[in-house]
Image: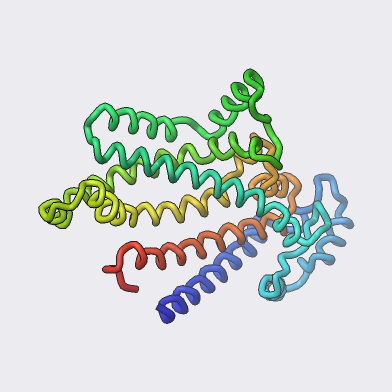
Amino acid sequence: MLRYILSRFAQAVLVMFGVSLLIFYSLHLTGDPAAVMMPPGSSQQEIDNFRHAMGFDRPLLWQYGHYLTGLLHGDLGLSLRYDQPVTELIAQRVPATLLLAVSALAWSTLVGLLLGLVSAVWRNSVWDLLARLFAFSGQAVPVFWLGLLMIIWFSLHLRWLPSSGYGTFSHLIMPAISLGAYYMSAIARLVRASLIDVLAQDYIRTAQAKGLSSWRILIRHGLRNALIPVVTVQGMYFASLLGGALVTEIIFAWPGIGRLAVQAIQNRDFPLVQAIVLLAALVFVVVNLIIDLLYVVLNPRIRL
């Protein structure tokens, strides 16, 4: 186990090194970074002064070394728009995005598991049809359209929930539902397909021949093995939710990382954009490692 963790950690370090290299050089592929970062209409003198202040007049290898040294010390640079350390800006926005992502994943997982379970157990029944229709609707409706409909109905007409903002549970309900609808549908469909396949295995028939109760067979022997592929996509979904809640955060004025990224792009704040992309890559790497370790817990037959 320890050897496996160390090897995966070494792979994660190499991946993050490659991502940092890609992020750094992608800025220079756009042309003169000083001219790109400066506001339109800046004079050549202002661009030259900015280029010298940022070190863009130094050799490219020196610039990357300086950038990598800062990363190793937790220094992601200074925001050009806010004139604050990038780490502080991101730290202020991470709790909001984390709360939204966890809430969306929690309700979508519970509802998706229930729909998939009902659909698989009562396959080809009216309950299966209703569960699949509900699941398909979540994938068919775009996130932005669902969010706008919820604002119009629950905020403007019924006045039950605030249309935007952050701070209370009522502010969280609509963004979490809007963000998690697609993932609920995907989880329901995956659970249904995986559980149907597991229930057709020989060891399920053996358990039935031994006289075990149907619910014990379903939960202990069926659902546990059916959850292995679900865990894989759950990790990817969570990482995607953390890095991809951009549309939802804009619609509901949610002060998270996605909204900060849009503002950084609009303001040509490349140090902040680089840091957010690097954070998203780090989330995917860490989640992948956690998923691999969870495999052994769910299925002891898997060896690292």
Q: Residue at x 54, y 35 (%)?
A: 178
State the image quarter where residue 24 is shown.
bottom right
Residue 182 is situated, as x and y percent measured from the top left of the image, at 46, 39
- Residue found at the far left of this picture: 209
9 up-or-down from 19: above or below = below
Left/right of residue 260 with respect to residue 247 in the rendered view:
right
Name the quarter where the N terminus is drawn.
bottom left
| Percent coordinates x, y for residue 6 in the rendering | 47, 79
Number of numbered discs visible in the structure rendering: 0
Is 171 placed above or below 40 here? above
Q: Residue at x 55, y 45 (%)?
A: 103
Image coords of residue 241 (percent x, y): 54, 48
Q: Residue at x 66, y 53 (%)?
A: 95
Single out the residue that lies furthest toward the bottom: 3
Which of the colour schemes (rainbow, by chain, secondary structure, one colour) is used? rainbow
> Looking at this view, is 174 or 186 the one in front?
174
**Residue at x 58% of width, y 44% of height:** 245
In which quadrant of the rendered view does residue 20 lie? bottom right
Question: Is 234 placed left or right of 269 in the picture?
Answer: left
Q: Quadrant of the C terminus?
A: bottom left
Q: Nearer the viewer, residue 257 or 212?
A: 212
